[in-house]
């Protein structure tokens, strides 16, 4: 990024509120995507291939902090250089119908949030598969391309604030670890929301290890039943901005 562009980011006026929304297991049912992938691997390449690929993928998850599906495929290929038929697996991943795995009303929630404040996708992942997922699912179009994908988003909070300065943030994420890290960094300037979807949000050990979010919901679509004030308990910008109504609207 050039110095000129960086200067523009720094000088940008603060939004009253910015909604930061995760992707995997928040808007997209990533658990179902993984099951589809496992079934396809076993059906097309056998159980041994499925099991070995998944071991590699889990090892990369521990190392990188995100799921690197294509990286795992590449590593499996290094181990099995003569299995040229495996190359078709990349097409399965890149052409996967991600829109079919959106949680019910996920895009409706994004549309509603955009009437209340700047709405940005905040995700982490690899440089190819994650952007492809966000694009093909329709999520990117739903937020007019306002998408941030980092290697570790909890380590990029300064960059998030520089790009989207705000009086208050609302972070919607299924991972309590992420919500807790951002809460520690931003304090009362953020309201945390946890949809209890997917393995991480329902893991008893994880739930016991981290404090609860400011707002916990069962499904992402439940946010359609919440008014703006529910997101702003820790903020004073509701009164100053006049955004105190369930039907308040802002222009993106």
Image (cartoon, rainbow, N blue to C red):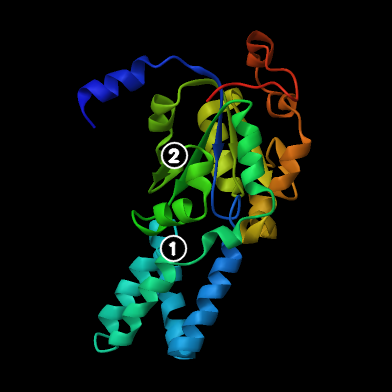
Position in image of residue 86 (x %, y %): 34, 82
User: In the picture, residue 173 is in which quadrant?
Assistant: top right
Position in image of residue 88 (x %, y %): 35, 79
Q: Residue at x 65, y 22 (%)?
A: 249
Q: Which residue is mark 2?
A: 145
Disc 1 and disc 2: Cα gap in Å? 27 Å
Rendered view: 212 above or below 80 = above
Category of crowding for the residue at label 2, using alpha-carbon neighbours closer than 10 angstroms: few (below 14), some (14–19), many (at least 20): few
Horizontally, is 95 left or right of 100 in the view? Answer: left
Q: Residue at x 42, y 82 (%)?
A: 52
Horizontally, is 66 left or right of 113 in the view? Answer: left
Rendered view: 100 above or below 144 = below
Position in image of residue 29 (x %, y %): 61, 60
Horizontally, is 36 left or right of 157 in the view? Answer: right
Q: Earlier in the sequence, mark 1 or mark 2?
A: 1
Q: Residue at x 45, y 51 (%)?
A: 135
Horizontally, is 60 left or right of 21 in the view? Answer: left
Q: Residue at x 46, y 69 (%)?
A: 58
Q: Tell me the element at label 1.
A: helix
Category of crowding for the residue at label 1, using alpha-carbon neighbours closer than 10 angstroms: few (below 14), some (14–19), many (at least 20): some
Label placed on residue 204: none
Decide if residue 29 is in sight here. Answer: no
Q: Which residue is mark 1?
A: 61
């Amino acid at each position: 990024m050039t110095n000129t562009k960086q200067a523009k980011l720094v000088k940008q006026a603060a939004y009253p509120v910015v909604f930061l929304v995760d992707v995997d297991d928040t808007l997209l049912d990533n658990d179902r995507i993984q099951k589809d992938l496992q079934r396809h691997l076993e059906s097309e390449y056998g159980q041994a291939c499925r099991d070995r690929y998944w071991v590699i993928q889990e090892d990369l998850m521990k190392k990188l902090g995100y799921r690197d599906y294509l990286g795992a495929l590449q590593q499996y290929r290094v181990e099995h250089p003569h299995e040229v038929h495996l190359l078709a697996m990349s097409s399965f991943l890149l052409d996967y119908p991600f829109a079919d795995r959106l949680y019910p009303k996920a895009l409706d929630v994004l549309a509603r949030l955009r009437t209340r404040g700047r709405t940005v996708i905040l995700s982490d992942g690899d440089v190819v598969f994650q952007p492809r997922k966000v694009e093909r699912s329709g999520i990117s179009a739903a937020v007019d391309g306002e998408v941030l994908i980092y290697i570790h988003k909890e380590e990029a909070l300064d960059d998030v604030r520089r790009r989207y300065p705000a009086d208050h943030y609302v972070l919607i994420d299924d991972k309590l670890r992420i919500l807790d890290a951002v809460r520690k960094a931003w304090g009362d300037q953020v309201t945390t929301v946890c949809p209890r979807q997917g393995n991480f949000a329902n893991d008893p050990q994880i739930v016991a290890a981290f404090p609860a979010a400011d707002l916990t919901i069962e499904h992402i679509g439940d946010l359609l039943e919440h008014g703006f004030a529910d997101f702003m308990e820790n903020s004073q910008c509701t009164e100053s901005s006049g955004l105190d109504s369930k039907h308040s609207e802002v222009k993106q």
